């Protein structure tokens, strides 16, 4: 019985709470709708007032604009004339500066050309002198080369002659009687061969 009483009490309390919530919800909905209607009325009044103020401001600005146009046109004309005079003065100044710059560049170009010409002539003379010196040295070396080549040919012939004489003496029946002479001849041949090798070396070094 006690549990049933508690359950009935809970059900009653829940029903009461539900009715209170429904009543509160209805009250809130009514207040919200009333508030929306009030906002709509305020918005319409604000829009009308703002539109009237904007129209008044537009009319004021248009009047001021129309009244200022002659003054603006006068200022524009004056500014245009001043601008034209300033542009003409600037153009004359730029032309003068350009002419002076061209004159300076011309003087610099002439001076540079003169210096380059003088330097080129000096370099040419130095190269010509060096060429003459090298040509003289070349001629001297060629003369030495020709002389060494001639001496080499002479030594070759002399060496061949001495070798032929040595062979002749060696094959001679008088070899025993002429051994001293043969040894002396061999010494001269060896010396001639040494001179020939030296001349060949000198010629190779020269080349």
Image (cartoon, helix red, strand yellow):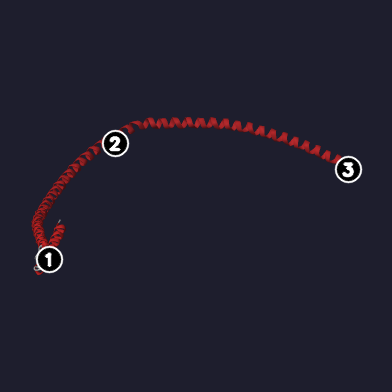
Categorize mark 2 by other alpha carbons within 10 Å: few (<14), some (14-19), many (20+).
few
Q: CA distance from mark 3 to mark 2?
A: 102 Å
Name the residue that disc number 1 marks. Answer: 186
Camera-nearest label, 3 or 2: 3
Q: Give the secondary structure at mark 1.
A: helix
In this view, the residue in front, 161 or 61, is 161
Left or right relative to 54: residue 148: left
- The residue drawn where x is 16% and y is 59% is 205
In this view, the residue in front, 108 or 35, is 108
Q: Percent from the top left, x then y, of residue 150?
A: 8, 56
Q: Earlier in the sequence, mark 3 or mark 1?
A: 3
Q: Earlier in the sequence, mark 3 or mark 2?
A: 3
Residue 21 lies in quadrant: top right
Left or right relative to 87: residue 124: left
- The residue drawn where x is 48% and y is 31% is 54
Residue 11 lies in quadrant: top right
Name the residue that disc number 2 marks. Answer: 79
Q: CA distance from mark 3 to mark 1?
A: 159 Å
Find the residue positioned furthest to the front: 173
């Amino acid at each position: 019985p006690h549990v049933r009483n508690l359950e009935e009490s809970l059900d009653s309390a829940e029903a009461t709470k539900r009715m209170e919530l429904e009543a509160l919800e209805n009250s809130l909905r009514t207040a919200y709708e009333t508030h929306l209607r009030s906002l709509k009325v305020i918005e319409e009044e604000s829009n009308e007032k703002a539109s009237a103020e904007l129209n008044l401001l537009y009319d004021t600005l248009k009047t001021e604009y129309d009244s200022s146009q002659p003054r603006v046109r006068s200022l524009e004309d004056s500014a245009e004339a001043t601008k034209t005079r300033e542009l003409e003065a600037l153009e004359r100044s730029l032309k003068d500066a350009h002419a002076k710059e061209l004159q300076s560049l011309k003087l610099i170009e002439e001076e540079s050309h003169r210096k380059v010409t003088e330097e080129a002539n000096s370099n040419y003379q130095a190269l010509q002198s060096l060429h003459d010196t090298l040509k003289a040295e070349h001629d001297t070396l060629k003369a030495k080369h020709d002389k060494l080549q001639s001496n080499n040919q002479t030594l070759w012939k002399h060496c061949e002659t001495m070798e032929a004489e040595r062979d002749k003496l060696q094959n001679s029946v008088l070899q025993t009687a002429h051994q001293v002479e043969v040894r002396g001849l061999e010494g001269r041949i060896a010396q001639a061969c040494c001179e020939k090798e030296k001349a060949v070396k000198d010629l190779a070094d020269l080349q």
